[in-house]
Amino acid sequence: MLNSINLDDKSFEDILAEAISQIPLYSDEWTNFNHSDPGITVLQNLSAFSMLQQSAINEITEPIQRSLLRLLGFEAAKDKPAHVYVSCGIQDPLSLPAHWKCHVGDLCFETEHPVTVEPWSVGKVYTIAAREEYRDVSYLLGRAIPVDAAVFGTDPEPGMGMCCTLTGRPAPGSQSVFWVQATENTGRNPVDQKAPVSFAALKWQAWTALGWTDVQAIDGTDAFLRSGAIRLTFPEEPLELCDQLPEPAYAVRCLLVRAEYDIAPRIHSFTGNLLELVQRRTHSACFQFAGSGTVAVNSAMSGYGNLFVCCREEKGGPLLAYRPKPAKEQTGRFYAMEQGEGGTLLLHFDRESWGYGPAEGEPQGVLVLCWDDETMYHRSLGPVYGYDDQVIPLEPYGHMIPDNFSLLAEMTERDGRVTYHLVAPGETDPDDLCYEILPSPGQIRVRRPGLGSGCRLFLASCAVTEGRRGNIREQNRFEPESREGLPAKLSLFNPAAGRGGETYETMEEVRLRFAAEMRRPTTAVTEKDYEEIVRRTPGLCIHKVKAVVDEDANSVSIAVKPRSEKPDPQLSPVYLNQIRKWLEMHRLLSVQITLRQPQYVKMNVQATIYVKSYHNGAREEIESVLDRHLDFSAADRGFGETVSYHRLVRELEQLPCVESVYELFLIPQAKGDMMYVGHDIRMGNHSICRPGQYLLELSTRDGSD
């Protein structure tokens, strides 16, 4: 991966022979060089030790390689679950606990938190013109054949927007997720968080008794430029039927506050009131609560009945184990269980009756662990022996999610009490138990035991994922793991593909990705470097780039043509600002950079051409060749290219309808950045040729037109 000196290039025999050959240089004592000579035996041992030492020094272990990559700012991918949004199709409100599971094939999906899904959906979708003219585009709700729609028209302006009706009234203050599937074939570069860009600003509103009321929105679509989720928090004021629509209905809408789009956004589906699921399977869950007489565990994990409860009895004190209340009343650390509504498990503590209980209001005063039936037999991981880099297997688990993993350390204090401590991975304090997850083999490595030496470890929280496999396609049917308490006709499908799933990278995969990344220019030095870096500007649609270096002035002039649905586009202020910010991160400090607007040189053609009398459509075929030859903005040619006179004449004469080209003149409409080279015309470094007006005189040899 990185070049280094090979220290392990000699065998044991080579090292021993070299040492024996140097005996006369360091000692004048006689030796017969036999193996029985004690001095030779010492040299053999030292040579073997030297070989082992050089081999160990020469070896770059995987943790060292990953640390070196981290120093270079290159982080290897870790296991990350995919997220998917699901439509439920229900008639009554549906309450689901955390860790509620459903399946697509062998993939398991869960809810992250307790959630209540309301029985409404998007009824109709309208686009709003500048004068609040409504156009029905409800075909966006169809799933069979996606059809694009320009929600803000072809020329978006502030005041334009989109309105959707709801088939029911959302609860005041509730949250809902809408999914926008945008048309993403515009050649737009991926968005980079280091260089964000914004082309527009939206405001979302809902119709209440006060009229259109602003609602809080988290837009993951960059104002409909890319596919993503939009999270709306409805106002505390209840929604009312809107009488300004073609049909009265509950409604929400979005309006453009600012519009500087390079390409007008188009979408081909819009869905609302979605349930968010995560592709993972939780085997062990950990819940923390503030100290209280009663805590509620609203999770499907509590249904297994495998619980372990700890409490802090004083502020800042250790966690002590509690057990279920026995049938006989007595003093001790107990809790009572009660089954609440919707599958919620209530745990009651009574300090007055049992003598012990959690400290009231103490943050993280109550800790509840829940295991599934399989993990119940594997929850104990064994002791921490006290040496560095102890490896503990986590059979039968692999590909654990680091953000959903923790251990419970059991320690015996000097006074004989058994206390518990929750330990997350990635700790760096040398006094703490520092460990890391090895997801692929399903292990944890205790880097430094700290004060945890001698403690016993238990699995506190553990969830596994399939990584990239969770990025499923849209329109899948989900089957609940258990239908107990669910509607009989519950239908779950995902209108959008899963996103965000990543799989733990092996060292070989990291090495290949690192090598590919190193081949891409990150610092602009040559003209090609500047052009490649500008083409990768995050969030922009870059079509053509031309960089020209002036070594005397130590400057670079860069002409950029953006992609656009409009002819002859120019760089907008958003483009200029974004490209400058991106180049500032990659340029040499001493180089001055100038961005140039593209210049379009319209090329008129005046020609007399003899055509064949029996051929129809000759003018259209000739104009098509002229368009293809002179339109550099659409072809693979760009800035500074040459209009070849002889090539154009040859292409025209090769047409089946053309007999010969009598005369042809290329006439620029205006003087621009160009020069004549014989009969050819070379565009300037910042100019692109475009077709102008054609004055064509077509006739046959016999004189007929």
Image: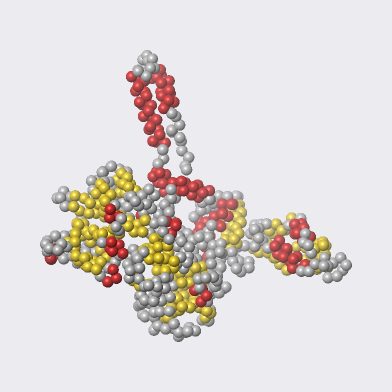
The relative height of residue 137 versus residue 21 in the rendered view (above or below) is: below
Taking the view exactly as shown, the residue that stands out farthest to the bottom is 243
Relative image position of residue 597 (x, y in whole percent) = 60, 62
Q: Position of residue 518 (x, y in %)?
A: 51, 48
Most extreme residue toward the right, as rendered?
702
Locate residue 106, reporting x and y percent. 41, 59
Identified at 50% across, 60% down, the residue is 190
Seen from the viewer's position, the closer of residues 12 and 530 is 12
Q: Residue at x 42, y 81 (%)?
A: 250
The image quarter containing residue 22 is top left
Looking at the picture, tell me which residue is in the foreground, 631 or 246: 246
Say which of 159 and 427 sits in front: 427
Q: Using residue 8 as the reference point, say whether residue 409 is left or right of it.
A: left
Q: Quadrant of residue 700?
A: bottom right
Q: Is residue 91 left or right of residue 544?
A: left
In the image, is 379 to the left or to the right of 490? left
Q: Is residue 165 left or right of residue 448?
A: right
The percent coordinates of residue 199 (x first, y second) are 51, 67
Task: Identify the residue shown where x is 44% and y is 29%.
Answer: 10
Q: Is residue 289 above or below residue 556?
A: below
